[in-house]
Image (tube, rainbow, N blue to C red):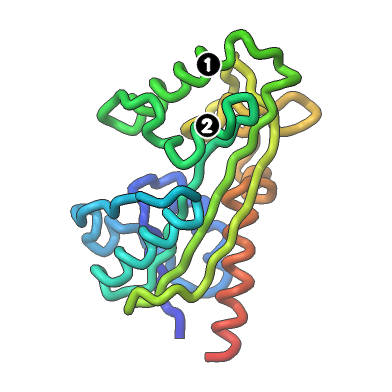
Amino acid sequence: MIQELIIATGNPHKVDEIRAVLGGLGIRVSSLADVGGENLAEPDESGSTFAQNARIKATQYARELGRMVLADDSGLVVDALDGAPGVHSARWSGSGVTRQERDAANNAKLVAELAKVPERRREAKFVCAMCVAAADGSVIAEAQGTFEGVITVVPRGSNGFGYDPYLIVDADGRTSAELSAQEKNARSHRGVATRAIAQLLSRRLALS
């Protein structure tokens, strides 16, 4: 019986987005901080794909905590940059100590890299890979979602984090950070992946 699912992230925005989708299953969604896991050593995200890194994080945290864990690896893929920043999205610039400092440095690098690229060639997408591991570290569910758009070098919106203010995602020219929480959950890469995970866990619940 699935009673609790730990979200392996220190990012409260991610926890809120995932909880908004999975809460309806009757599963208690907790963060690492809720179960005293925030001081655990972070896994070495050595994978070359988002899916590999999500699996590394989920299985390691699950074994260390002895609980069921959901981990995700997500980032921005920009066609004109040959797929960069990709799996290196979180620390692409190599600068900053806090999350806010890293985000600011990453976004500054994104703007600089695309400054001479016409908007029509700034196609990009957010990718989110998710993995759920049982308490023994065995993988029980995996899914992936994407959120496509075009990069703007002028950020807009405050309803997101990371690269959200720079990805235009609809015909009205709104960025991911200009969407409401409900709109974002309905359309985003993380929302797509979380709903797929929810379906997989629902089947598991039905069989338990």
Contact (CB < 8 A) between labels 2 and 1? Answer: yes
Query: Which corner quadrant of the image does residue 207 belong to?
Result: bottom right
Q: Is residue 53 left or right of residue 160?
A: left
Residue position for label 2: 84
Q: Is residue 112 visible?
A: yes
Give the vertical position of 114 relative to 130 (above or below): above
Q: Is residue 166 left or right of residue 161?
A: right
Q: Residues within 10 Å of mark 2 (few under 14, many from 20)?
A: some
Q: Quadrant of the N terminus?
A: bottom left
Q: Where on the picture, by quarter, is residue 106?
A: top left
What's the residue at 41%, 22% (across, down)?
A: 104
Is any part of residue 159 visible from this angle?
no
Whole-percent x, y for residue 2 in the image: 45, 80
Q: Position of residue 59 (x, y in %)?
A: 36, 67
Name the residue furthest right: 171
Q: Secondary structure at mark 2?
A: loop
Query: x%, y% of residue 88?
Result: 43, 37
- Where 12 falls versus 195 (above or below)? above
Mark toward the start of the polypeptide (2 vs 1): 2
| Front in this rendered view, residue 46 or 146 | 46
Type of amino acid at the residue the image marks with label 2: Ala
Residue holding disc 1? 113
Badge 1 marks a residue whose secondary structure is: helix
